[in-house]
Amino acid sequence: MADELIPVEHLTEEAASAELRRLADEIARHDTLYHGKDRPEISDADYDALKRRNEAIERQFPALVLSDSPSQRVGAAPAGVFAQITHARPMLSLDNTFSDEDVQDFVASVYRFLGQIPDNSIAFTAEPKIDGLSMSIRYEGRKLKTAATRGDGTTGENVTANILTIKEIPTELPADAPDVVEVRGEVYMAKSDFLALNAQMEAEGRQAYVNPRNTAAGSLRQLDAKVTASRKLKFFAYAWGEIGEMPADTQHGMVEVFRRWGFPVNPLTRRLTSVDEILAHYREIGLKRADLDYDIDGVVYKVDRLDLQARLGFRSRSPRWATAHKFPAEQAFTRIERIDIQVGRTGALTPVARLEPITVGGVVVTNATLHNADYIHGIGNSGERIRPKDHDIREGDTVIVQRAGDVIPQVLDVVLEKRPEGSVAYDFPKTCPVCGSHAVRERNEKTGKLDSVTRCTGGFVCSAQAKEHIKHFVSRNAFDIEGLGTKQVDFFFDSEDPALQIRRAPEIFTLKARQEASLTKLENIEGFGRVSVRKLFEAIDARREIALSRFIFALGIRHVGETTAKLLARSYGSYAHFSEAMQAAAPKFGEAWNELNAIEGIGEVVAASIVEFFKEPRNLDVVQRLLEEVRVQEAQAQATGDSPVAGKTVVFTGSLERFTRDEAKARAEGLGAKVAGSVSKKTDYVVAGPGAGSKLDKARELGVTVMSEDEWLALING
Ligand code: IVH
């Protein structure tokens, strides 16, 4: 197909205009086939090619961009873009309770309302309060018909296409389900998936997300359901809206029915009677909270019997038969002493608040991220307002700090009453505080919006970027040089002694020779003993031969994470071939460019970034010097389909004794298996070493095949 198309550079304005119209219509038609009718006519790769061509033409002729162009539809949807759905029954919220007394009052009020003496005869369910987004999923004739967000409780947004990408949600109900059913529950993102997504974002030099809830919300509000699909959202069912015939007469009975119908339901749900039991359970859940793979912010208590629920009824917006017992928020007030700017490997300038030390949820916090210039001014990643206009964050401000799970502490809000007199708004630097180069906010080519990240343009000239690059270069998934941790890299980088200095990656490999020729001996320097120096040089020498994918990842090309590096290694086979092809692709059209873009999993932004890297003579010089020191292995041929584990999903858990985790992962992936971090129904094998815990339990619970390290080795070695 691509052969017959006129290269974008050669299009006349008239031809470009006609083609943009044709592409918009064609892409819209495929969207409907794919999402609405589930009957795609073209492959994903061909679909992506259409979108890429559309974008390329738009870049060449920005004035011709159509208002309904597919490029205008990526990213978070602006409010009001989704169609509205009026809920058949309103989606209400819950009253909150915070103290033991509040819970006692709630239980007493239920008895009082029903005119009973409090004799522990009324049962309550206790369910974890999932910190996600509530969703109403409507089935008609036992087929998933629509899915809507809560919205204002009366009308929500139609996110059916996105919900269809969540594998945990059944698209069909069994024959015994009523004709019309609305199942309600919470869509959320697992903490592990959130952390993995952020690790990937960081590896690719992109802005990290704030927390799983916001990420899940952003992932759902995508007009491109493929983005939603890539985000691994999950679901717990716990409530209902309109429903034909009630299949049970208690809350816990209903949840059990949902489970039978194929919905995930929360395993920590209990049925309890006395206040004492309820409070004991609340504390137990509180203790488990940190270990759960999803965020919860409290426990919801509901009267179990539905006839009693009906009698209790609702106040204006919340039921009388339920309450949310919230966990105390892990928040605290403190003062910002100053705001520092950290410069990352890709030049991102991240403002960090240095705080008067404060304990938040049992941990002493001294720093909190302020993310970027917009965040300081109360503007979120999609341009939305997250704090009132005058609540900008300043040095000297008293602020509310929050720490949630593994997430970096954040500054939530400013206490304006405590703002010192004469305070001035924070002036975000326009130059890099480390090297003085210009710091700019790039414009996103696709959306035309300003990037939230301010970036130093100094590249290798910037010592912060150069230093971070060395740290990346020696990191575990790159060159993996043991003995070169953060402290050591700082030491070698900052050293003024030519025999000790490491400012560029190739110098790691010349360190030993420089040492030997010099009078300065590393082993005489504090912190480096004779043994550690020997080990360090051994570790460096051991990496003089390196896999192509690691080598590419180590180069630190923006947007090229571990996964992309592997794709490139597999596609090009050798470094010589790769670098030649990237230089040939520089004009961004022609065979080499098309070949790069045709790699499944590599989009145009990534492709452009790689090509840019190879255009920069300073980068080529560093690579050249590196190649004088190390030998890059050719990539192994792609795994053959006949490996016994090809296409299988494996989870390694426990302390492995026969191989390291990275080794196990690499080997399994080399054989075509997928290595996952958590156990699910889709897991094929769990390889458990000594001390395996919750993942092993989960595997047993789900009936996943569990094997020892030796059994695994026997399997893969055939
Ligand atoms: S019941 C009429 N159960 O909390 C009551 N809600 O603060 C309907 N939530 O909008 C809600 N876990 O998003 C209920 N086990 C649970 C829940 C839960 C989380 C959320 C839900 C709701 C909000 C109310």
Image (tube, rainbow, N blue to C red):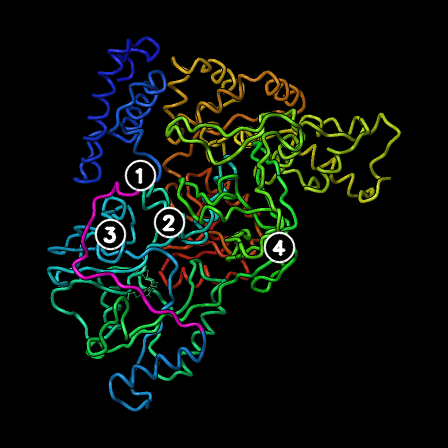
> Could you tell me the amino acid type at mark 2?
Ala
How busy is the neighbourhood of tag 4: few (under 14 within 10 Å), some, or many (20 plus)?
Answer: many
Q: Are marks 1 and 3 in contact (CB under 8 Å)?
A: no
Asked if labels 2 and 1 touch by Cβ distance under 8 angstroms, the answer is no
- The earlier-in-sequence mark between 1 and 3 is 3
The vertical placement of 665 against 442, above or below, is below
Residue 221 in sight: yes
The tag earlier along the polypeptide, 4 or 3, is 3
* Residue that numbered label 2 is attached to: 216
Disc 4 to disc 2, how far (Cα)? Answer: 31 Å
User: Image quadrant for the N terminus?
Assistant: top left
Q: Residues within 10 Å of mark 2 (few under 14, many from 20)?
A: many
Please identify, in this view, whether the residue under mark 4 or under mark 2 is nearer the observer. 4
The amino acid on which the numbered mark 1 sits, given as a three-letter code, is Lys
Q: Amino acid at mark 3?
A: Gly
Residue 715 part of the magenta segment: no
Number of the front mark, 1 or 4: 4
Q: Position of residue 702 (x, y in %)?
A: 35, 60
Q: Secondary structure at mark 4?
A: strand
Q: Is residue 40 above or below residue 271?
A: above
Q: Quadrant of ligand 1?
A: bottom left
Label 2 secondary element: helix
Marks 3 and 2, the one that precedes in the sequence: 3
Identify which residue, 77 or 718, lies in the foreground.
77
Q: Quick one: SS at disc 1?
A: helix
Which range of residues does the magenta coloring cover? 79-98
